[in-house]
Image (cartoon, helix red, strand yellow):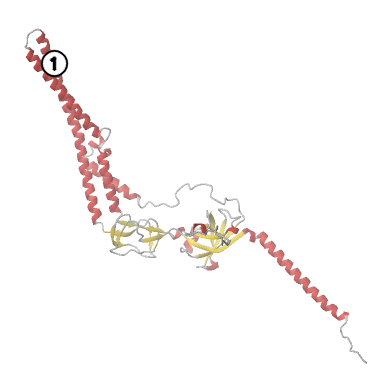
Amino acid sequence: MATPTDTSSPSADAPASGKRKLWLLGLLVLVLLAGAGTWAWYSLVGRWHESTDDAYVNGNVVEITPLVTGTVTSIGADDGDLVHAGQVLLQFDPADSEVALQSAEAKLARTVRQVRGLYSNVDSLKAQLQTRQAELQKAQQDYNRRKMLAQSGAIAAEELSHARDALTVAQAAVNSARQQLNTSTALVDDTVISSHPEVMAAAADLRQAYLDHARTTLVAPVTGYVAKRTVQLGQRLQPGIATMAVIPLNEVWIDANFKETQLRDMRIGQPVEISADLYGSDVKYSGTVDSLGAGTGSAFALLPAQNATGNWIKIVQRVPVRIHLNADQLKDHPLRIGLSTVVEVDLHDQSGPALAQQPPQQASYTTQVYDRQLVEADALIARLIHDNSAQGKTANR
């Protein structure tokens, strides 16, 4: 009986097995090269950079709130308008504050004249004391002369008694005048008109009235753009009510929320590259790490997580990192508060601290738009004191 012929042979399987081994070897080489490339990229590049897209533009939102009660009569800017520091934003009806200011001016003028009277009274009492002392000296001399005459019998004892009574009256008059002088002197001692307590109290009232009147005009503390306007004409506002905000867009920064596992090598001062979703990857911003947050975002939440509960689940926390932006780049490509960004921190330079080592040496933000108010008030007070103190002659005693 014939059997089928077996067509496979060792010589036919050898090429297929060789190709398979060659492919496997090539795949192994590719895997090794990929692993080596990944390791090299991580060692040379990846480990020195940390990035996140959980980053947003932030900035100062300067709320405009009144300090006095008033009715709005004028609105000087609307949402989106550019305003400069000192520019008028709101105007209240000034009628009530003007009346109060005029009353305070009159009170200060009247007080200055009354205090002038105190100084004049002291001068008058000094003259009276000198007169009483002269009368006392004359009465003493008359008594001494009559006493000698009485001893020789030249005058009657009754006349000597009258001289003694006159001396007693003159002494009492001197004591009374001296007491009145001391009382009046105590009211003006070691003071001039401008530093007299009553004048200073009236000046303080005038200064407050002047400030209340000046505060019926609300000005922009900083240069920026108006946002969140809620005030309307005719609205009666109370102190502390938010009316609008001014946002200086040239001073914005980035709040980047990095995972806690990304902060090990992050230091203050490290360079940062930023791209905003508004402009895409074509526009790059340069910045530096300004500070690392003192706590995680959840720790400062309105309702912080209670990690001690029984159903606790560990979640990787995020820490806010503030990034300072290059102001010159913001001029060409301005950003708005709240915009999304992607940041990448270069970790090569780790010489900086992880936390600030020194307290601030000066104020971070200041404004001088309110300084003029007190200067103008003091100038008004000085003029009123001068005009009501005999052309300032008594004020320089």
Which residue in the rendered view is the most extreme toward the bottom? 1
Question: Measured from the top left, where is residue 238 in percent x and y?
Answer: 31, 58
The crowding category of the residue bearing disc 1, from other C-alpha atoms within 10 Å (few below 14, some 14 to 19, many at least 20), is some
Q: Position of residue 262 (x, y in %)?
A: 59, 59
Q: Quadrant of residue 18?
A: bottom right
Place of residue 229 in the rendered image (x, y in percent of width and height, measured from the top left): 36, 64
* Viewer-side residue, 162 vs 306: 306
- The residue at the point 28 percent across, 58 percent down is 70
Which image quadrant: the C terminus? Answer: top left
In-front residue for pair 122/368: 122
Which residue is rendered at x = 77% and y = 74% of the image? 23
343 w.r.t. 363: above or below: below
137 horizontally vs 50: left or right: left
* Vertical side of 364 occupied by 228: above or below: below
- Going by the numbered disc 1, the residue's amino acid type is Gln
Q: Is residue 31 left or right of residue 359?
A: right
Residue 135 seen in this snapshot: no
Task: Provide residue 119's location: percent of width, then percent of height.
Answer: 21, 34
Q: Quadrant of the N terminus?
A: bottom right
Residue that appears at 16% across and 23% down:
172
| In the image, farthest residue toward the right | 1
Q: Quadrant of residue 319?
A: bottom right
| 53 vs 143, nearest the viewer | 143
Tally of marks: 1
Secondary element at image label 1: helix
Q: At 61% across and 60% down in the image, what residue appears?
A: 49
- Furthest-top residue in this view: 152
> Which residue was labeled with disc 1?
141
Left or right, 82 with reference to 379: right
Residue 345 visible somewhere in the drawing:
yes
Q: Quadrant of residue 170?
A: top left
